[in-house]
């Protein structure tokens, strides 16, 4: 599937997916949604891809769902549960379960599902000009795209409630202080820094990173004993990888490891 609504670049083991509907601040229509799902599936299958970056073109990261489909300001927006089941729910599960790191490079405003798409990623790198808005309340909706799951876990219930129920814009620095963002960089160098971060992660032991994601995902419902047991099982799997062998050899030989993601 190819579409100019998502630009794709492969370099240094990194696939960069750029949401490309700048005229509507990269809001999702059906084609962009299914295109992103398809490209994430492809990235998952390709062993040469060891990290993924999601970013936006123009001045926004993503303004969530396209509210203007059809262009008729009087049109009634029909909203059914299946829309989320087949759309954002699939997307969030794909990102959380992708056996590779996913970095959101948030280049501007991230609103509604666009904000929660970023928070679903493993690391969020934000431009100093970026902002985050749980815009749902302004149109009578609840946070979706994983927002009601992710926000309380990332920032605690008070801040999650404030963000969701007031819908105010949060600037990038505050988002970092609150734990929503890994780092904030000048907007002029965001793309370069995001690529460097992803390229670094693409050289990490990819299978171990996949197992970390599995363990982190499970930790939100496991008790400590279940989580300890999971660590034992997953560590055995990590121990069976070539990269573990390489890591130990490199340590003993006092040289940097060369991980191949196997
Ligand atoms: O079934 C379901 O659909 C459920 C799924 C829901 C998921 C959701 O994401 S719901 C939330 C949807 N998103 C929003 O409510 C955000 C709407 N946008 C805004 O609040 C503001 O645009 C921003 C805060 C993001 C940015 O504000 P600002 O002042 O920087 O830009 P602007 O002037 O509002 O927008 C620029 C253009 O983008 C404008 O078009 P124009 O006038 O230049 O022709 C605006 O209409 C368009 N745009 C922005 N967001 C959307 C959009 N067009 C369609 N859909 C959008 N979401």
Image: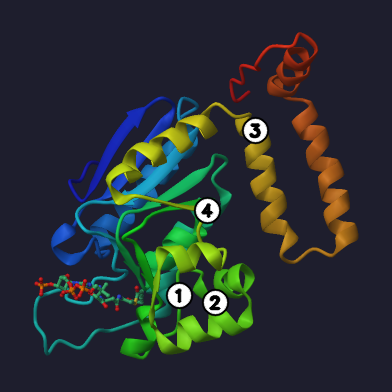
Compared to residue 185, the image places residue 203 above or below, namely above
Sequence-wise, the earlier of marks 2 and 3 is: 2
Relative to 259, 38 lies left or right: left
> Contact, CB < 8 Å: mark 1 with mark 2?
yes
Sequence-wise, the earlier of marks 1 and 4 is: 1
Could you give the CA–CA distance between mark 1 and mark 4, rounded to whole angstroms? 22 Å
Pointer 4: what residue? 182
Nearest to viewer (mark 2 / mark 4): 4
Pointer 1: what residue? 144
Percent x, y for residue 72?
Answer: 9, 82
Is the CB of the residue bearing disc 1 within 8 angstroms of ligand 1? yes
Compared to residue 248, the image places residue 5 above or below, namely below
Could you give the CA–CA distance between mark 2 and mark 3, rounded to whole angstroms? 29 Å
Pointer 2: what residue? 148
Q: Quadrant of residue 49?
A: top left
What residue do we see at 44% from left, 40% from top? 52
Q: Which element type, helix, strand or loop, lies under badge 2?
A: helix
Compared to residue 163, the image places residue 104 above or below, namely above
Tell me, for residue 207, which label it has, or none.
Answer: 3
> Contact, CB < 8 Å: mark 1 with mark 4?
no
> Contact, CB < 8 Å: mark 1 with mark 3?
no
How crowded pointer 4 is (Cα within 10 Å; few <14, some 14-19, many 20+) is rated as some
Q: Can you say which quadrant of the picture contains the C terminus?
A: top right
Could you give the CA–CA distance between mark 1 and mark 2, rounded to whole angstroms? 7 Å
What residue do we see at 47% from left, 83% from top? 164
Sequence-wise, the earlier of marks 1 and 3 is: 1
Sequence-wise, the earlier of marks 2 and 4 is: 2
Percent x, y for residue 86?
Answer: 41, 65
Q: Residue furthest top?
A: 253
Could you give the CA–CA distance between mark 2 and mark 4, rounded to whole angstroms? 20 Å
Report ligand 1 position as a quadrant.
bottom left
Q: Which element type, helix, strand or loop, lies under badge 3?
A: helix
């Amino acid at each position: 599937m190819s579409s100019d609504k998502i630009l794709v670049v492969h370099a240094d083991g990194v696939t960069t997916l750029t949401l490309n509907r700048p005229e509507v601040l990269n809001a999702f229509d059906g084609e962009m949604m299914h295109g992103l799902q398809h490209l994430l599936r492809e990235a998952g299958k390709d062993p040469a891809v060891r990290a993924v970056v999601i970013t936006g073109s123009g001045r926004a990261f993503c303004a969530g769902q396209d509210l203007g489909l059809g262009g008729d300001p009087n049109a009634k927006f029909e909203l059914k549960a299946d829309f989320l089941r087949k759309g954002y729910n699939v997307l969030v599960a794909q990102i959380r379960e992708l056996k590779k790191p996913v970095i959101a490079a948030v280049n501007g405003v991230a609103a509604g599902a666009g904000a929660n798409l970023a928070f679903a990623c493993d690391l969020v790198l934000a431009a100093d000009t970026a902002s985050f808005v749980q815009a749902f309340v302004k149109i009578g909706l609840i946070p979706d795209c994983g927002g009601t799951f992710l926000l309380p876990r990332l920032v605690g219930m008070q801040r999650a409630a404030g963000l969701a129920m007031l819908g105010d814009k949060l600037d990038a620095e505050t988002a970092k202080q609150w734990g929503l963002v890994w780092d904030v960089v000048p907007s002029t160098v965001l793309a370069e820094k995001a690529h460097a971060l992803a390229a670094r992660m693409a050289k990490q032991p990819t299978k171990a990173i996949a197992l970390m994601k599995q363990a982190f995902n499970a930790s939100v419902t496991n008790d400590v004993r279940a989580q300890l047991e999971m660590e034992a099982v997953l560590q055995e799997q990590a121990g069976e990888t070539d990269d573990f062998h390489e890591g130990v050899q490199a340590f003993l030989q006092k040289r940097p490891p060369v991980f191949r993601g196997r």
